[in-house]
Amino acid sequence: MTHTMYGSPASLFTGKARAYLDWKRVDYREIAPNMQIRDEVIMPAIGRMIIPVIETEDGAMLQDTSLMIDHFEAANGGPSVYPGTPRQNFAARLLECYGDEWLVLPAMHYRWNYNEDWILEEFGRNMMPGAPRDQQIAAGTMVGKQFRGFVPMLGINEATIPGIEASYEALLADLDTHFSQHPFLLGSRPSIGDYGLIGPLYAHLYRDPASGEIMKRLAPHVAGWVESMVSPKTPLSGEFLADDEVPETLLPVLSRMMREHVPFLSATATLLTDWLDQNPDADLPRGVGLAPFEIEGVRGEGIARTFSLWMLQRALDYLDTLNSDERASCEALLRAVGGDALIGFSMPVRLAYENHTLTAGST
Ligand SMILES: N[C@@H](CCC(=O)N[C@@H](CS)C(=O)NCC(=O)O)C(=O)O
């Protein structure tokens, strides 16, 4: 028996998990879910339709890519994608959060506003390989409707698109400079931060054809990094940079996160505080209203996602494991990139993700 990953070639988070599994040399097979797998495997195990899901060789069902990565880090041992030094480890966790939770904006924008016809057909091809093209398009269109619906909810619209594109192109330029000097974010070994970025930067922003053309034209080193992430030539190898160095070339990327994403996360935390006051006994919803954001001078608002706070909490929890010198060096990094808001950031509530559900504990 081997592990089974239910996932799809076009899925952002499947791309993240697959890149990691291949680097970690995990023995697995990948199956694209059809209706039967949805109804008989994923829904009963997870309680909702979501991918990727991994069924381990002993029958446990894993959902959420961060938990999958943590599972195999613990179960398989060997070289880790978590750097062993404080600044690198913290920076990598922050960038995982940024990739997973904020770069969905450019990912969804470019997919749905530049690749719509292609992706609808691609969804159909993945769901019904071998079926006639018109049936594939019809099936893909049905599934695609749900994802297309996320676009306005995220705050992607005529007014915000210029800011989203300006931000993405500037991010590509910064990453292009970085990857012209380093194979991965923190040296010659991919870190948890690389896996956060590869989700949006692979399926939507590299593999979707019109997006891929943009990335290859504007940022060939980023495209090269994507290729080495998704087809690792030397799994389980490489080193993080010496002396806990977070390279200068990553600082603009972290600054962008602090400028765009962190205020949105703070606003989400405020909305969650209010929501908890008003709904002390209710189950935590996926969204707690609309939070404002600003991206390259353009203002918008998007659904305030509780899950994003759980991802931030994972990074901030790491600080609590450090001694005071180590913590001070992480805080100095935060100050250097305009991340003062994360120093002493107060979560409205302790969040837990258990049995595939996000729950609120005590404050
Ligand atoms: N945090 C989750 C996110 C997974 C996720 O959003 N998957 C998408 C496909 S890439 C999905 O199935 N979305 C359905 C939904 O959110 O309703 C993870 O890391 O696994």
Image (cartoon, rainbow, N blue to C red):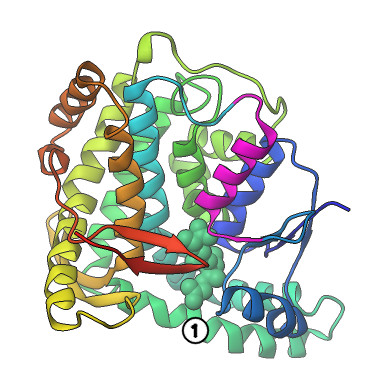
Q: Is residue 49 left or right of residue 331?
A: right
Q: Please state which of residues 125 and 355 is positioned toward the viewer in this rendering.
A: 355
Res 42 seen here:
yes
Residue 206 appears in view: no
| Percent of width and height locating residue 148 | 46, 80
Q: Is residue 103 above or below residue 47?
A: above
Read off the residue under disc 1.
146
Q: Quadrant of residue 104?
A: bottom left
Relative to 67, is 349 above or below? below
**Figure check: 160 above or below 263:** below
Residue 166, position in %: x, y?
Answer: 26, 52
The residue shown at (28%, 59%) is: 164
Q: Is 295 situated left or right of 213 in this image?
A: left
Look at the picture and state if 190 lies above or below 17. Answer: above
Magenta-colored span: 61-79
Task: Sort mark 1 into few (<14), some (14-19) or many (20+) by Cα contacts within 10 Å.
Answer: few
Q: Nearer the viewer, residue 103 or 360?
A: 360
Question: Mostly what secondary structure, the magenta segment?
Answer: helix
Residue occupying image coordinates x 55% and y 16%? 239
